[in-house]
Amino acid sequence: MPGVGELGAHPKGPGLRVHRAIYEDELALDDFALQPLDETATNDFYELTVARHRSNATVVTSNRTPDEWLGLMHDQLLAQSAVDRLTSTCHELIIEGDSYRKRQRPSRHSA
């Protein structure tokens, strides 16, 4: 599944991937809001969140808090509405500490 920023830019027409993602039983948005969301991405996120609210499982992973997402979205009203819906029914898991990627990298052996 592409990032939300890519959802509106589909060769068969704007919003086709968003439309398909709305009806998936489970949807994962990985590394959400690492970069600012343009107008299309913000609209896509809003449409996804509103359509899936209380009906389908949506997992969002991010290095930012939902409050930080708001400042990265093009339209603050759509952003607030989408984030409110998403966070009103969510289970939040906060993982602190070193990145698991650092722990999994191969160790260097001296020759």
Image (tube, grey):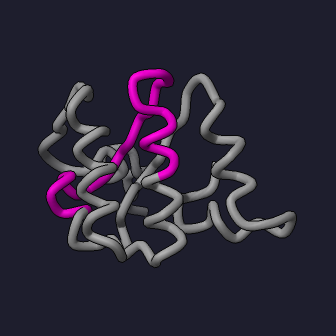
Quadrant showing the C terminus: bottom left
Magenta span contains residue 53: yes
Above or below, 61 relative to 3: above
| Quarter of the image where one finds residue 12 | bottom right
Residue 89 sits above or below residue 32 on the image: above
Residue furthest to the right in view is: 12
Residue occupying the point 41% across, 34% down? 59
Vertical relation: 30 (above or below) 10: above
Residue 56 picture location, percent across and down: 50, 24
56 is higher (above) or lower (below) than 76: above
Q: Is residue 53 left or right of residue 13?
A: left
Along the line of sight, the residue nearer the viewer: 51 or 103: 51
The percent coordinates of residue 34 (x first, y second) are 36, 67
Percent of width and height locating residue 60: 38, 42
**Which residue: 47% across, 76% down?**
39
Residues in magenta, as a range:
47-69
Q: Confirm whether the magenta stretch covers residue 97.
A: no
The one of 80 and 92 positioned closer to us in this rendering: 80
Image position of 60 (left or right of 8)? left
**Residue 89, horizontal then vertical, whole percent:** 25, 26
- Compared across the picture, whether 15 is left or right of 12 comes to left
